[in-house]
Image: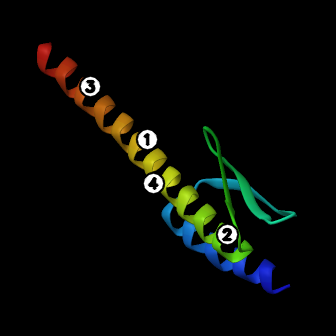
Amino acid sequence: DSLRNYVSTKLEKIERHFDRITNMRVILSVEKQRQKAESTIHISGGEIYAAAEGNDLYAAIDQLADKLDRQLIKKKEKTKGHKHRAKVINIEQTLDR
C-alpha cells in the first residue's frame, strides 16, 4: 500500500508536465537482488515506455519517474516545435501571394 502511494505521488508530478496522458501502466517486480520498475504511458499521438532497475524499489521508482518526466518534456517540446513551424509556413505562403 505504501508503494502504491509512493508511485502515485511520483507520477502525479509527471502529469503536471503533460496533460494529454490517456492511460498509464506501472509494473513493479522483484527478481533475486534486482528491483525493477517499468511503465508505459499512452498519450495522444503515441506511447512512452521507460524502465529502471536498482537495489531498492523506491530508488527504481525515482529513476523511472525521472526518465518518464524527461521523455514527456521532450515529447511536449517536439510537438510545440511542429505547431510553431506550421504557423511560420502559413505566414510565408501568405506573404508570397
Residue drawn 80% across the image and 66% down it: 33
Pointer 2 or 3: first along the chain: 2
> Marks 1/3: CA distance?
17 Å
Residue 90: image tag: 3
Q: In this rendered view, identify the residue nearer to me: 77 or 97.
A: 77
Task: Identify the residue at the far top of this view.
Answer: 97
In the rendered structure, the answer to whether residue 81 lies left or right of residue 24 reads left
Q: Is residue 42 above or below residue 34?
A: above
Q: Mark 1 packing: few (<14 Cα in 10 Å), some, or many (20+)?
A: few
Task: Confirm whether residue 19 shows in the render.
Answer: no
Residue 69: image tag: none
Residue 79: image tag: 1
Pointer 1 or 2: first along the chain: 2
Image quadrant in which you'd find residue 34:
bottom right
Image quadrant in which you'd find residue 11:
bottom right
Report the amino acid beneath label 2.
Answer: Ile
Q: In this view, does 47 lie above or below 5?
A: above
In the rendered structure, the answer to whether residue 24 lies left or right of residue 89 reads right
Q: Do the residues labelled 1 and 3 touch (CB within 8 Å)?
A: no
Closer mark to the observer between disc 4 and disc 2: 2
Q: In this rendered view, identify the residue nearer to me: 26 or 45.
A: 26
